Structures are given as structure tokens and as C-alpha cells.
Image: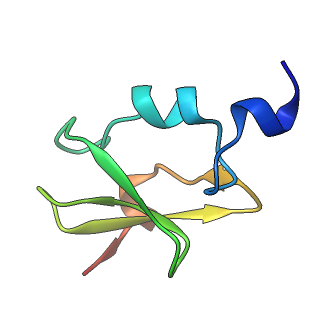
Amino acid sequence: MTKSDSTGATGLNADLLQVLACPRCKGELTYSALSPSLDCMGCKLHYLVKEGIPILLIEEAQPF
């Protein structure tokens, strides 16, 4: 499998997006291309994605 096969429009691996969860509430994360970030609707937090790497540290998350 090539990188383009496993990486979606988000720049993140599609399989990775399916298994990632919010570190605070363990809820589902959705990708937002505006920031770019992974957003938890339960906690109302943005977890930034920097250079294709999700930063899933609660203390670095930003409220929305």
C-alpha cells in the first residue's frame, strides 16, 4: 500500500483516524480542515494537527 492509498484528504492515515479517541472523554474525534485539528464534540476541544501529527495532549487542546 502506498502513502496515497492510506492517507485521505486530511493528510492523516484513514485507519489512524478510525482508532483515535479524545484523551479526555474517549469520545470520537472528527477532522476539521480549517485549523487543521481533530475536534471532540463532547468536550468541545480542538486538538491541533501539526505537520500531519495529531497533538493529543489535553493541556494543549483549545476550546471552541
Residue 41, picture quadrant: bottom left
Q: Position of residue 49 (x, y in %)?
A: 60, 61
- Left or right, 49 with reference to 41: right
The residue at 49%/66% (across/down) is: 37
The residue at 22%/35% (across/down) is: 26
Q: Locate the C terminus and report the quarter of the image it occupies.
A: bottom left
Which residue occupies the foreground of this view, 57 or 17? 17
Q: Which residue of the protein is positioned furthest toward the right in this rendering?
A: 2
Q: Which residue of the protein is positioned furthest toward the front in this rendering?
A: 5
Q: Which residue of the protein is positioned furthest toward the left in this rendering?
A: 42
- Left or right, 23 with reference to 57: left
Residue 6, picture quadrant: top right
Q: Position of residue 3 (x, y in %)?
A: 85, 34
The residue at 23%/45% (across/down) is: 24
Q: Position of residue 58 (x, y in %)?
A: 36, 55
Q: Which residue of the protein is positioned furthest toward the top in this rendering?
A: 1
Q: Is residue 24 above or below residue 35?
A: above
Q: Locate the N terminus and report the quarter of the image it occupies.
A: top right
